[in-house]
Image (cartoon, rainbow, N blue to C red):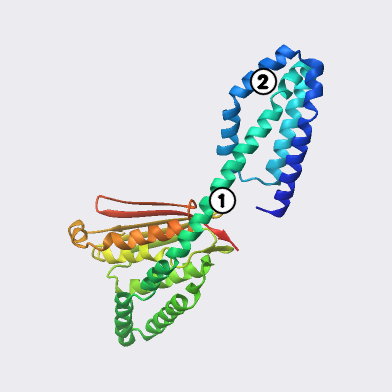
Amino acid sequence: MKKSVIIYIHIFFWVALLATYFVAPVLARHLSPKEFGTIRIYVQVLQPVFFYIGYLLIMKIKWNRKYLLYTFLGIVTSYLILFLISKKVFAFGLAPLSSIFLWTTIGSLFRFFFDWFKKKNDVLVLEKENISSNLVLLKYQINPHFLFNTLHNIDTLIHDNQDKASKSLVKLSDIMRYMLNDTKTDFVDLQNEIDYLENYFSLESLRLKNEKFFNYSIVGSPKGFKIAPMILIPFVENAFKHAVDSSIENGITIKIAIEHNMLIFDCENQYDKSESDKDKTRGIGLETVQKRLDLIYNNKHRLIINSENSIFKVKLELELNEN
């Protein structure tokens, strides 16, 4: 939360608290003891409602200066309208103010401490899982199957198309450099991650029999955003590994969209169900990715994986970090 927002919250809190001290004189002037007693009974009954408004709602709002200002102006305007309607109506509106403020504040504090303890626990879990996560990342960094296939394809190109072979070697070099150097940090530029994926696509396409087998598109600008390194590549590798023969069209379709601070990643591949049933390791890699997403992007992502009519589909929505 920004420092300026914290300052505004402090101001809002003390203004609201001090305002409650002016309630008693107004009530004494415009409400009878019986009316005030009746209001107190209703307010006591509604205390759990005020508590859970604070517990469930207040801490969930992403407060900023605009929201705080609108909230303050909304409260002041509401009471001004009540005052213009009738001073007695105004007094009825003021009567529960202290209790509402007190119990919503208590509810908010409860939620704050529960969330704080949960966050601390998540940090401990993340630290414990960090070594395991790094080992998984290393596993994806060093993929002998992809490396050997690419080198074989480049070797073939050297005799047929030396220019294309040279460009492919440069892309392979970029991939290796990215995997060994850039991914040592917790987050990388989204542009670099996409460049890595596109280099991977290009090298995998060397072995395709049909150019229309693989379709890739990207919408939006990745500039200004960061992402956990190699969070998407397991889905891509899985698609190429389990896709059907590359002589068909639309065997693999990958779409990336960047909308505001959200990344939407869609990956589909046609597969042979009989062959897939034999592969017992297929789900292990995806489960590991899900675990890594839960650790790094807790409550900031949505992953949907399903298969229908021999088409395996992955949809990932991810809240990106800004530079």
Residue 305: tell me if it is visible.
Answer: yes
In terms of image quadrants, where is residue 152?
Answer: bottom left
Q: What residue would you read off at disc 2?
A: 40
User: Which residue corresponds to the image point at 49% horizontal and 56% vertical from the top-left?
Assistant: 122
Q: What residue would you read off at disc 1?
A: 116
Eyeballing the image, is 148 above or below 201? below
User: Which residue corresponds to the image point at 29% horizontal and 78% vertical from the top-left?
Assistant: 149
**Is the C terminus in the top left, top right, bottom left or bottom right quadrant?**
bottom right
* Residue 74, numbered label: none
Q: Residues within 10 Å of mark 1 (few under 14, many from 20)?
A: few
What amino acid is found at the position of numbered circle 2 in the picture? Arg
Q: Residues within 10 Å of mark 2 (few under 14, many from 20)?
A: some
In terms of image quadrants, where is residue 272?
Answer: bottom left
What amino acid is found at the position of numbered circle 1 in the picture? Trp
Eyeballing the image, is 271 above or below 205? above
Q: CA distance from mark 1 to mark 2?
A: 33 Å
